[in-house]
Image (spheres, grey):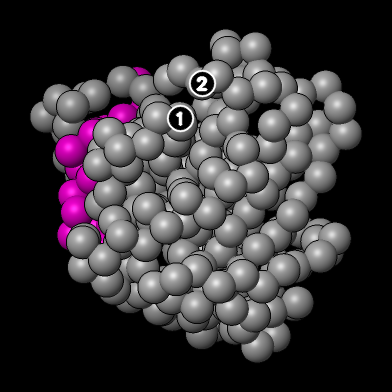
Amino acid sequence: MQNQGHKKDPIGVFDSGIGGLTVVREIRKRLPEETIIYFGDSARVPYGTKSKETILRFAKEDINFLQSFKVKVIVSACFSVSSNALDELKKEFAIPIIGMIDPGVNALSNESCGKVGVIGTNATIESDAFKKKLKDKFGDIDIYSAACPLFVPLVEEGWTEGDVPELIAESYLTPLIEEDIDSLILGCTHYPLLNSVIKNVVGDYVTIIEPGKEAAKLLEKFLIDNNLRNNGKGSLKVYLSDIPRNFERTVVNFLGEVPGGIQLVNLKD
C-alpha cells in the first residue's frame, strides 16, 4: 500500500454503525498520537443483511465522506464491507484501505492453525471471505463457520454477560466446539464485547482472535513503513448518520471512553 499523505493527516475509520468503535478503541491504544475521523452509518445499519451491491454502494459513500477530511489511510471496520466489497473498493479508490479479513487471518500461524472456527454476520459468513483467505494462506485446513446474528442486538442492549447471552452463545458455538476447533475468529465488531461469554462457552483451549486488534497492528506497520506516523497529540471525532437511542451508554461501552463530541451527518442515499 502506498499513500501521498502527510504525518499530521487523520486516519479514517468507518462502519455500518457504532460497532466499529471497538476497532477505534484498539487503534487509540496502539496509536494515541494519531487523529481519527470515525463515521458510523447508523441510519442504515446493519449492512450484514444487505445485498453485496448495496453494501458496496454504501461503502463508497462512506469512503467519499472520509476523504473530505484528507485522511491518509482508511480502515474498514465493517466486516460485511471487508468481506463483500474490499477488492472493488481498492480498485476504485487510490487511498490505502485496511479491512478486517487479512488481519484476522494473519494472526494465525502454521503452528497454531489447525481447526479454525469463524463467526460473524450472515453477509460475512455467506461471503466465505475468511475461508478463502485461510485456504490461500494455509492450504487444506479445516474451517467451520457460523452466523451469529443475535450477538449484535445483545451487545447493543448491554447484555454482554449472564445466562441469556451464554445460552445463545452455546446454541451458536456448540457445532464448532463439537468439531474440536482450536482457534476462533470473531468476525464482527460487536463480538469482542462478548469475549468473556464466548470464552466460557468454548473453553480455555480455544484461542480467540479479535481482528480489530490485529488491524491496529497492521495500521501501525503501514504508518511506520510509509513514514506517516504522527508524533503530535491525537484526537477523535465521531460522525454518525443517525443518533440511536441510548447511544451515549452504547458508545462508551464500545469505545471505552466518552468521546469529545458526536456530530450528525446526512449522506445522500
Amino acid at the residue labelled 1: Pro
Foreground residue among 217 and 179: 217
The residue under label 1 is 96
Q: Position of residue 38 (x, y in %)?
A: 63, 54
Mark 2, secondary structure of its residue: loop
Q: Nearer the viewer, residue 259 or 23?
A: 259
Tell me the crowding category of disc 2: few under 14, some 14 to 19, or many 20 or more residues within 10 angstroms, Cα based: some
Q: Tell which of 125 and 161 is nearer to you.
A: 125
Give the residue type that dot 2 points to.
Answer: Asn
Looking at the rendered image, the quarter that the C terminus falls into is bottom left
The residues bearing labels 1 and 2 have C-alpha atoms spaced at a distance of: 7 Å
What's the residue at 88%, 34% (across, down)? 233
The residue that label 2 is drawn on is: 3
SS for callout 1: loop
Taking the image as shown, residue 7 lies to the left or right of residue 174, namely right
x and y percentages locating residue 208 in the rendered image: 47, 46
Magenta segment boundaries in residue numbering: 111-134
- Residue for point 37% across, 62% down: 58
Name the image quarter holding the N terminus.
top left
